[in-house]
Amino acid sequence: MNTSPNFDFNNDFPPDFTWGVATSSFQIEGAHDADGKGPSIWDTFCLDPANIKDQSDGTVACDHYHRYREDVGIMASLGVDAYRFSMAWARVQPDGKGAWNEAGFGFYDRLLDELAARKIRPHLTLYHWDLPQGLQDEGGWLNRDTAHRFADYAHEVARRFGDRIEAIATHNEPWCTANLGYGNAQFAPGVADLKQSIQVSHHLLLSHGLAMRAMREVGSRAKLGIVLNQWTADPATDSPEDRALAEFEYARSTAWFMDPIFKGHYPELALRGHGANAPEVRDGDFDIIRQKIDFLGCNYYFRAWCSSATPPVPAPAKQGVTDMGWEIYPQGLPELLVKLKAEYPELPPIYITENGMANPDKVADGHVHDPQRIAYVRSHLHALKQAMEAGVDVRGYFLWSLLDNFEWNSGYSKRFGIVHVDYATQQRTLKDSALWYREFIAARARA
Ligand code: IFM
């Protein structure tokens, strides 16, 4: 596949295809204690400088809480149809249970008004990793009760805003919450315990099902679903060991979250592999988890490359790696989507809710030249088109991310935005990729 920024590629996606950009609350909002907001586990995690590569935190981030009008204006100038963002639970319910914070809801109310005024359709994620610290103090996601608190929160948000939002996702990438938050301590709350991480994944899925039920009760017009980070897993060699590793990797990641939602059980291979670390599942849990969803959000960045050798055989990375060190592998996207379609007959319409790359971008003479990102996005859109031509029902694409932002344990050292942010001045500069995306959207096929 040609990945040069200039290879010929027209926007001949369906005319009603949704083009968007994505962000999340903790990564851009800042205003960490404004207007009654409670602390989240990421506020706490950042207090230990050893946790974040550049010792930074989210107290100011992109100051989007105060600059949301400017940021929505940028989106409007790009011509996007939709904006995917998340709500900071601790902003609207400081302790994660009990009293609601009207001032916190006020921010999202104003943001929704601004989006409506610009005709940008909101896609909300309820949970993008910033659990209220108050709930963490009671055991966080390891405590089954947190799933019920999440359902209360989902119900309240749907009741207040459901008719003004196009789509609500319960979770963003629960794999990360479980595996990075509880498996290897790279993310908040910083626990490294395999058994706990697997139990947490079950509580996250349970909370998804409970929240779906709670939001359905409200009966708002928002479409309801979940956002998963997903990948295929390729063996590095043909050896039985590498093949077994790849099968297990797929089962314990992509299938681990898909099977309960669409089949009502965990994948057998992963359960066997987890052995004594398998989660405690109560009677009726899978009935709760297996709710019909209106859409699946798929975040795609890379494939898993599975090598049992020491040292491991590196991924071929024929198209290079991003600034995160992630292999650029657009072909994995259609491979993944076609596989999902074959494996899950009840698969609902899909949105690519995240895709993009980190790049060491710099402003020079008021410009940011990021041909690598343009090539990345183009090649992934080209690949996405192949999946659609193969019959996968994909309705939209959200570029990660609108703005450079707080990249979790990498702090501000990694830039994913199509808009550059100078953190000292909060100056926003459209990168070449933003200008390209604007032209690409504008050239969409007319009906
Ligand atoms: O920045 C993250 C985002 O919060 C979740 N998906 C992956 C992105 C890049 O790492």
Image (spheres, rainbow, N blue to C red):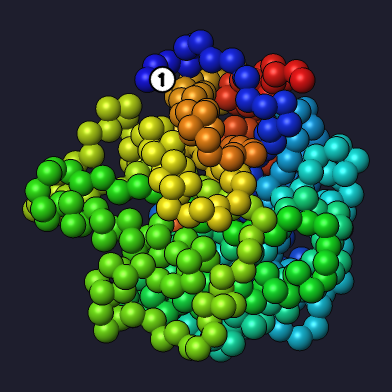
* Residue 132 appearing in the image: no
Residue 419: x, y in percent? 63, 33
Nearer to the camera, 169 or 372: 169
The answer to whether residue 418 is above or below residue 280 is: above
Secondary structure at badge 1 equals loop
Query: Where 139 sits versus 381, above or below?
Result: below
Mark 1 sits on what residue? 3
The residue lying at 27 percent from left, 84 percent from top is 276
Closer to the camera in the image, 294 or 97:
294
298 on left or right of 114: left
Quarter holding the N terminus? top left
State the image quarter where residue 368 is shown.
Answer: top right
Instruction: Estimate the x, y position of residue 112 in percent, counting from the top left.
Output: 84, 51
- Residue 245, image x and y in percent? 20, 57
**Residue at position x 70%, y 18% in the image:** 445
Asked where in the image residue 163 lies, by quadrant, the reply is bottom right
Identify the amino acid type marked 1.
Thr
Judge left or right: residue 26 versus residue 202: right
**Can residue 228 be seen in this snapshot?**
yes
Residue at 40%, 65% in the rendered image? 256
Q: Residue drawn at (39%, 81%), measured in percent from left and top? A: 279
The quadrant the C terminus occupies is top right
- For label 1, the crowd category at 10 Å Cα-Cα, with few meaning under 14, some 14 to 19 and many 20 or more, is some
- 244 w.r.t. 231: above or below: below
